[in-house]
Amino acid sequence: SGGLESLLQLARCSRLTEKLPPNFVTIDTVDHNDILVESYRSLASLCPILTSTAASNEGLTRKWVIKIFLALTDVLNEEEKGDYIVEEFQLESLRGLCYLAKYDPIRHHMVDNSLPPLFKFIRTAQTCTVPTEYLDDVGWDRAQAAKEICHLLGLDMEGQDMLNDPNFHRQWLQIEQSFPIQAMARDEIRLILNDTWKEALKSTGPEVSIEKLFSNLTLDEDTLEIRNRMTEQYAQIYEKYDDELVAAQNDEPPTSMWRETVMSPGNDESKQSNIFCDREWILAHTKFMDNCSTDMAIKSSVPITLALRKLLDSYFPSKMIQQVVLPLFDLQTEASFDFRAVSMPKRHYVSFRREGNALSRLCKKHDTSSLKAEVFWTLGFQNSSFGGEFTETLLQALRKCTAIRSLSFSREESAFTDDKDHYGSTLLAYLASSLPPWIHYLSFDNILSKRAINLWLDLMKAYASTSLKMKGRGTLRGLAIRNSPHLRALFEKLNSGGFELNYRQLPIFSLRHLDLSGCKLGSLCATIFGTIYGADSAISLESLDLSDNSIGKGSEIVAILREYCDRDRTEKFDEYNAPAIPMKKSPVEKLNLSSNNLCSGYLATEIFCMLGDGFLNFKSLNLSDNELCGEEYSSDRSSKLKDILTATIGTNASLIELDLSQNNFSNGCIANLFDGIKRGYSTPAFLHLDGNIPVLDRNMLDELRLCMHRARVQHLTIFATHPEIPMSGNPNFGPPAIVERKVSYDSEQNSAISDVSDCKKASSASGTITVLFSAPLVDKSLRAVDLLDLEAEREHLWQCFKEASVDIDVSFDTATVDRMKHTFVKGCDCLHYSGHGHPDYLVFEDDCGGSYEFTVDELRRMMQSEDGFGAPFKFVFVSACHSLLAGQTFVKAGVPHVVCCKHEAQIIDSAALAFTRTFYLALAKGWTVKESFEMGRQAVAVSPAVSNPEEEVKKFVLLPHLGDHDRVIFNANRVPTWPRNCANDVAPLSSRRNGNFLPSLPYNFLGREVDMYNVIRSIFSQRFTSLVGNSGIGKSSVAAAVCEWVMMRQNTVTCIKQIFYVHTDQVHGATRSRSRSFLHMLHKQLIDSGLLVARAEKEASPPMEEFIDTIVDALRSTETLLVLDGVCTNSNPTDNAVQFLPYFLNSLFRAASDSRVLLLRDKNDGNGLLPPGSLSGLDEHIIEVKPLSYENTIKLFVHLVPYAHTGDERRRLIEGLRRFDGDKDKSEIFALLGEGVPSKITDSAYGMDGDTYERVRNLGVEQRYV
């Protein structure tokens, strides 16, 4: 009737400056603003109706939902100008958007455009310190509605920098929103696998499902509901398979209303591309899944759609690595085909500090360690450039994200041919020698400069010797350097002999997969073949991709292969012609020589000759796009390719995949090929002839399908009767990196489950290590002591021994006097101490986080036995500043080997991390102390994260100087999984955090050591503690840090065994009672922890008093710390927290004598909420959180501001700003940087423009030289 269009016209009107449209009849007694408010309220009320199935069936969703969405979002950016009417508009709009945010097509666009106003609304309510009528009513409701939308968008609201830089969070939301798209891609892959093998499965006996054949195949059941909802909702807005999708795929101009309205001037190009990529992909996926019928014909090749191919190529630039993760052309029954890809946005990266923190949160949020097979995580950078501290901070992030397996860098633009480093790729060259051991694959596509390649080779020379000493155990399994023309100069240097480097020192020595496609190496490819097939070769390469390298005739390669075959012939029989053990065959099982113009020579023919003679054992051979016609002669011109191919293809038992597509085989040649297949006893399961000229006719295609069906039945029969025989070169069936991960780097949870029997069989390990950490919060004078990142070092050590996978028990403990005595009594092979040091003592902890000065005299007395001195340790590692004296004390006490590692940084520095990893890995592998020490120093020398390696190596000292350190500490056996002892208490906190309901610490948490100490002392001595402070002061951060401190010290903290952290700000919906919300959240956590049993769905909710009693009963016998965050607030007058909170606390303190409560509330809540003596005779112990000091304000600002790109720049700025003498100058800087309030400091750092930062930086520079 036109009413809805009228509402939209009203919503477009400005509230005061613009009159209503002339066709509207108005009443003088009605305020125009009231009409506008009612218009927004009416549009908001339509949102749940328009997103319903009924509206979709009537076509209303497609017609109206986008127009209403745009009308509601336009008002969010209106300026408030001090009156209430705009806030009313915005509140009504947000209420409607809460429904539209549940709608996937709209949610994706909301992520791109609506975050800035949403963040502003939340911050306005949080930073308002004086309650007003506006804040109590509209402001609070508006902030709650904004929080609800952020929650629906998938935003994690933890962290003090959460509400800053919406563009940053938009990018990470887009990354996370790509995960359902990836699940749809895996859905297509499962369908492809089913279509590939289902007919063959029917022919081999009782029908077996594809899920049973591929036992680890991911089914993505956790995303099934999301995927179904997304495809349904996109179909509601866009007609299925509309013509516009075809136009979009053909790059034709868009015509739809959505494109006309959304792609308006001022919209960011990256936002648009994200929307339409999602839309096009989802619609194309829906069409593909609907059109794939269950009775599709047997396929000669896997039908990968163009959309799926583009998606996989963007995530895996190297086709070789892509095939390792997704072996579609093989029968690898252990493969899971499961991956998660994090594709970073295109931009210039000068640091990865903040991104690394977000990546860590993302990996934890989507933790896949509980799945039956490991998920392959990959991190990719496309069309980006790099500078500053990118490499160092990326490595720091990767050390936290142990799920990442692959790293890729690629560019689509044409490569530069000069020697300049246009993209900062020189920084990337350092990665290969410093990657964490769980990174198995590294790809560079069209990005490495000549300088980068030369630097990379120099680093490999230094690093290779260490790898060789480690018994050839490299960490990289696959390396791809694609489309890099500068690589030719490097091979020319190697080939000419002008560069002294043993081939065993090349990275390919420890690789399984090497991709050098598109590098135009030409005849220099013979260098690679010579290295692999040489007489003294020890290469274990399984896959080699040399496609698009202009090989041409390949005469040198033929000569190398011929020499290899001749050696094989002469060594097969001894001098008496008796059969001897045959020479080891070529390790290469997958060879790609496509697009190399092989038609001009006889390389292709010779390869098939050697395959027929059994000298080569390729499982996959790709000769596509070489203009082969079958008339190519062999080297002796005795036969042609078509004849040898016909004779070989039916008799070679190793070949599983043969790709001859995009060539020029005649119909007669192909007919002979099929005859050879029929006469033979073995056939490739995958034979590709796509794009052949002339095109195969229908009869030939039918013949090809029947041949492939026969081959697949044959392979399945072999697998069914002899499952121990691998179908591919990998003896463990699955992708090599994933299988290796199952052996060496399995998750803590899976290890505990799989090795229960091992734990019962073995009672003791071959070696024991005790790690004592010390990080006191305050010194004896109650002055703050800088926090050490102990969790990072603990994670680092954990991964070191996990990589070693040997029978060594590792225990982590807190460095207190009692725990030190316990370690002496228990005994161990190795003691590792990490913490603060002093020339006269080691800094230990007391029971509440204070410092204890453990002097060298006390250490000497503790180590003294009745017979003099006794050394309970074979080896001691002291990682602390001023550690030399303590190390000498251990030596005097009789410890034969002591390593001192001196570091000064708050976070354990990169040199210490590099040394520790290599040293312990070598020591665990059975190398002597001296050899391990030298390997650790060498790792520091080649690490890109170490700025001054010549000086840094001097930090590490081996004592006694003249001692005999050629001794082995551990002679441990290798174990299939580590840890062997099934204990979870030694696992890093990051792997146990979800089970304890703890929030993550905010980015760059600092300056709260004294506050933490006061809270810890209070909760240890009092049952009820309140942490108060102004909004944004950091109460939640302090509470989270206290919880983490307690969980890290389970051996020393005896009064708290479990923590429940209830944060009501994470309860979404403006109309819900906070008190009821926190009780329901606590109830859910108790169910998840096993202390309560969930009610049946149809069971009625009990009265609130009974509900509270149920919670209290569950906590009655537990030693629990309950943290209540955001329960108390006066910002919402309708909140009835006062009604239930006192009742709950009274009940808890009466019934659960071992429970303690930490309550977080705003300072403005006052002290009247819980009157003294009202809680079962317990008083409220109040601790106030105050602003940060001037010093810590500077540190936090400098670490957050995005303009400080390097560590040196940040250190210089801090040094300069802290030197201001006058109180006036300091107060001005203090006010500019946020007045010590973390939320304001964060706002200042991320909101500061470049000119203001330069002014601040110049002030700091001036002060440095005063």
Image: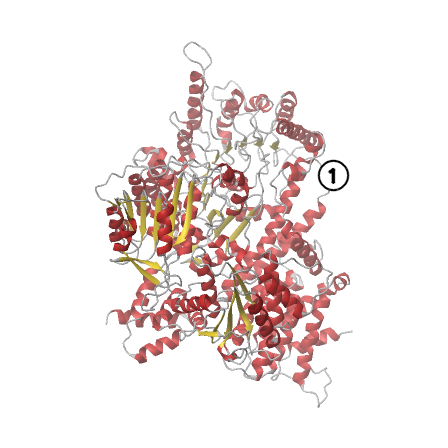
Q: Against 675, is 1098 above or below?
A: below
Judging from the image, the colouring scheme is: secondary structure
- 540 or 1252: nearer the eye? 540
Q: Quadrant of residue 1006?
A: bottom left
- The residue at 46%/19% (across/down) is 582
Q: Residue furthest top?
A: 576
> Residue 533 location in percent, x, y?
42, 27
The reply to whether residue 961 is visible in this rendering is yes
Residue 1246 as seen in the image, left or right of residue 1153: left
Residue 58 as seen in the image, left or right of residue 731: right
Q: Against 563, is 1266 above or below?
A: below
> Residue 203 location in percent, x, y?
71, 30
Please tell me how crowded label 1 is: few (under 14), some (14-19), or many (20+) other residues with Cα within 10 Å.
few
- The residue at 34%/62% (across/down) is 851
> Residue 1080 location in percent, x, y?
62, 65
Residue 515 as seen in the image, left or right of residue 1142: left
Residue where numbered disc 1 is placed: 295
- The residue at 47%/25% (across/down) is 585
The reply to whether residue 1068 is visible in this rendering is no
> Residue 1121 location in percent, x, y?
51, 64
How many numbered circles does the render carry?
A: 1
Quadrant where the N terminus lies?
Answer: bottom right
